[in-house]
Image: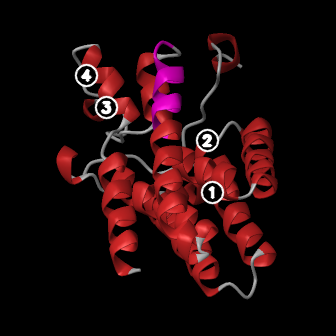
Amino acid sequence: MWFPILITLATGYLLGNINGAVCVSSLMNDDVRSHGSGNAGLTNFFRNFGSKGTIVVLLTDMLKTMLSCAVGHLLLQPYGLALEGTMLGGFAVSLGHDFPALLGFRGGKGIVCGLSVAICADWRIAILTAIAFFTSYGFTHYVSLGSIMATLTFGVGFLIVYWGNPTIMVLSIVMPLLALYMHRSNIKKLLSGTESKVYLSKKGKKQ
């Protein structure tokens, strides 16, 4: 069983190196990491390039995650570990997205990946995760706060629903911890009141 696990991890990590923000900005003869926060994520892309191409970035990161989850599902399903395989694939692609070896280990923060994992693993938790994000963002316009709340919802949701499944429980802790670690600078800015807000329209930005 170790061979399918290693294949799942390797495939997921390599897929994670396909970064939507980097790919789309490179098509514009630019690099999203040379702008703003230097992060290769959806938020930094939107802040610096606007809505143009943002949907492609989103779909790229979602599709690579879902493909990785599908690989893990298919490889571990014969062992009765389909859900575990899905989550393992999701963890691997998140790791590759955050620390992509092929991109100099300068990646994103994995929130889109996390939501995509939830969509593949348990749609109920995916809905709660999305609600947590959009509610927090809607009231504050802090994408980072929405991401943090979504991360916590993801972790607590999987812990509660799959309590007693050691693999799922471990991954439901490790994945949120990874996301929180990637948001450590945002957390500091939120606490100090220096975090930047993100508005979906120029009109909203002026308010």
| C-alpha distance separating marks 1 and 3 | 23 Å
Q: Secondary structure at mark 4?
A: helix
Q: Disc 1 designates what residue?
A: 148
From the viewer's perspective, is residue 141 above or below residue 76?
above
| C-alpha distance separating marks 2 and 1 | 9 Å
Q: Is 6 or 58 nearer to us in this picture?
A: 6
Q: Disc 3 designates what residue?
A: 22
Residues drawn in magenta: 52-61
Q: Secondary structure at mark 1?
A: helix
Q: Secondary structure at mark 2?
A: helix
Which callout, 3 or 2, points at the residue further toward the start of the chain? 3
Which callout, 1 or 4, points at the residue further toward the start of the chain? 4
**Within 10 angstroms of label 4, few (less than 14), some, or many (20 or more) residues?**
few
Q: What amino acid is at disc 1? A: Ile
| C-alpha distance separating marks 3 and 4 | 6 Å
Q: Is 8 or 119 nearer to us in this picture?
A: 8
**Within 10 angstroms of label 2, few (less than 14), some, or many (20 or more) residues?**
many
Q: What amino acid is at disc 3? A: Val
Q: Disc 4 designates what residue?
A: 26
Residue 8's x, y, as percent? 39, 63
Q: Residue furthest front?
A: 78
Q: Secondary structure at mark 3?
A: helix
Residue under the point 54% across and 22% down: 55
**Viewer-nearest of discs 1 and 3:** 3
Per the rendering, the mark at residue 143 is: 2
Per the rendering, the mark at residue 12 is: none
| C-alpha distance separating marks 3 and 2 | 20 Å
Which callout, 1 or 3, points at the residue further toward the start of the chain? 3
| Magenta span: chief secondary structure | helix
Contact? badges 3 and 4 (CB < 8 Å)? yes
Q: What amino acid is at disc 2? A: Val
